[in-house]
Amino acid sequence: MFLKGAFLFMARTSLSRANQRRENIAGYLFMLPSLLFFAGFVIFPMGMGLFTSFFNYTMTDFSFVGLANYKELIADPIFQKALWNTIVIVVVSVPVTCIFSLWVATVIYKMHDAYTSLFRCIFYLPVVTGSVAVTVVWKWMFSPYTGILNYVFKNLGIISKNINWLGSPEYALGCIILILLTTSVGQPIVLYVSALSNVDNSLIEAAEVDGATNLQVFWKIKWPQIMPTTLYILVITTINSFQCFALIQLLTSGGPNNSTQTIMYYIYYNAFKLSRYGYGSAMGVILALIIAAFSAMQFKLAKSDNG
Amino acid sequence: MKKLFALLLCLVLMIPVLAMAETEITLWTYPIGSWSQSEVVDEVIANFNAVYPDIKVNVQYLDYQSGDDQVTTAIEAGTTPDIIFEGPERLVANWGAAGKMLDVSDLWTEETSADIAVAGPTLKDTCTGADGNIYLYPLCMTAHCMTINYEYFKAADALQFINEETRTWTTEGFVEACKKLAEAGYLPGIVYCGGQGGDQGTRALVYNLYNAQFANAEHTEYTIGSEAGVKGLTLLQDMVNEGILTADPAIVAADEIALFCNGTVAMGFCWNASAAASNKATLADGVTVFPMTFPSEDGVPVLDGGVWGFGLFNNGNDEKVAAAKKFIQFVCDDPVQGPKSAFATGYFPTKGSFGDIYTGTDKAENGEYGMFTPYLGDIYQVTPGWATQRTEWWNLLQRIFAGGDVATEVGVYSTNVNAK
């Protein structure tokens, strides 16, 4: 009787293991196309980038130089300027994007569905509009000759003469950050509206009955519940800000006098304009490390904040 | 038995297909005049296929914003086209010097060389790399000039500073004209330096002012760091500081041309026959294009030359190379197609035997730009390090117009571009 039971158990277990294995295999097979794509277009290029960063890789040369590219870029004043500008973009745009998106979302998520959708569309429009179209319109607005911005500011008495917004080292980076904000807030607003709508209403009502203020309700009830969304938005916005490229390429080419130079654009400049692929790869590796460090820091902070 | 019969039938059916096997070649073309328009290029290919039906030509159109990036990517990926249509600054000084192009000296027969020498005695040198190989077979050429808005100059009483007959003026006259224009409330000119687009205009402006040379005659070194070059740049910096000229690090030549055509600015530093034709429809009321040479100290200008032609990438397929050469010969040398090919560019043919291709056509105005050909200078764009030079040039202008010391900044530029 005991043996029969043991055999039955073993048979069931092995059947269960076989089923599990089959399910696993099926699962991996379903994932295979994506994994192949990910390996081919993400993992392999990353590996190649790291590999070529140790070479003097140009159109005519491919020789091992060890850490020479890294040493050179540490001493490169344009790289330092690009790194500084990139950090400024991230430090300004990430908090502003998150705070502005959260503010807009808290205002519009309580509205009638039609209005909420309308505002979501309005804020999402720059995201789905092509970068080229967005930059062309901004270029017109910033034009020192025929731009509407100078026209409005002059008529309001804010400025006395036309300013070359994109051509002045004092204003150019600010203009880039402003455009970046308009194209960055769309997705966080949509995500925050969704997250705020999912906050448990009974908790809010209970807190209100207990006499909690609006700020307390937000800080003690809503904020912890939308923290995963905030974390996602922080990471995505940080990565996007670090990788700011199209705006720079289309509007300023890193100028004037490198005042809008970013690491992403400087990588492109070295790789495609000067054919210094190895040097560009070294910068790419450094950028990846910085992004990883920033993201890890954000995860850590968000976790401790949540805990 | 049935299977055998079916197999035989298939083989018989394949015979004509095999007999008509095509050689497929790829052409990448930059937007040189109407060579950016598919209907024009399709017609060229149709004419070619009427003679060579067994060669299929695929075309990809490049632009000057992303074209170089596409070619660079193709070179590294090993997917370069068989033929490319552009100028010696890319084909000879860049890709040729990097060993990516094929020698096309066999296209330069005694007959074609003599014919090309009539239009441009030094063209063969321009198409020849430092290693002695010839990487380009030319189709057309032009002299890049500048333009003024005749109406604004007239209204500002600045016409007195230009020689309307020879289209020349002196540096002194240029400065005075800018003052007059500014006094009359016009924006005289914009020295654009937001990128490398149309940088031939700013280069010619700088080196003409005090008769400097952009590169030495041997094409081994960039020499704009000379005393005359520094003097020219200093003058421009002073004019910008004085407010009689504008420097804009946020625009390139295309933007400046648009501002000229809509009447915002009184002169444009990037102009030629093709620009005149393509911008004709965009001219605002009150804008009358009056092409000019660049101002120089002695009133004798030297203009930047543009040469465009075909080169072959080294793809290691002899059959394709032979087919590509047939295409180039047909497009450039055929007595009927050759003039048509050059006509489509809007520039002048590099073969003397084609003569005047514009008189009596709808592009008769292009022919008028022939008056600038005598001012054509040395085609220095084949000097090694051209790609670096182009990126350094607009950065140099940005630094100078941001208040940098001219001599110091030119020194930095010269060191970077002449680094071997």
Image: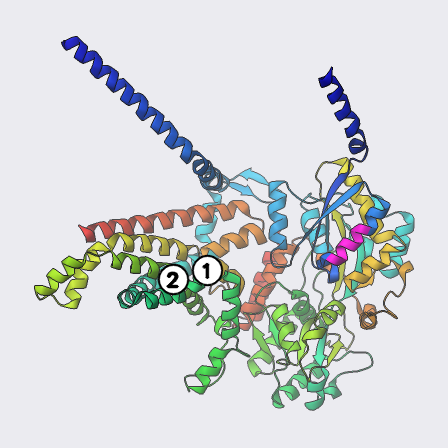
Question: Label 2: how many residues lie within 10 Å, few (<14), some (14-19) or many (20+)?
Answer: many
Which residue was labeled with disc 2? Answer: A186
* Res B295 → quadrant: bottom right
Residue B210 visible in the shown view: no
**Are the residues flagged by discs 1 and 2 in contact, CB closer than 8 Å?**
yes
Say which amino acid is labelled 2: Gly
Q: Specify whether residue B191 is painted magenta.
A: no
Residue A102 horizontal side relative to residue A241, left or right: left
* Res B417 → quadrant: bottom right
Residue B402 horizontal side relative to residue B22, left or right: left
Residue in the foreground of this view, choosing between A33 and B359: A33
Mark nearer the N terminus (1 vs 2):
1
Q: Specify whether residue B44 is painted magenta.
A: yes
Give the Cα separation between the discs numbered 1 and 2: 9 Å
**Element under disc 2:** helix
* Res B294 → quadrant: bottom right
Residue A168 visible in the shown view: yes
Q: Which residue is located at x 75 percent, y 46 percent?
A: B57
Q: How many marks?
A: 2
Which residue was labeled with disc 1? Answer: A128
Identify the magenta region.
Answer: B39-46
Say which amino acid is labelled 1: Val
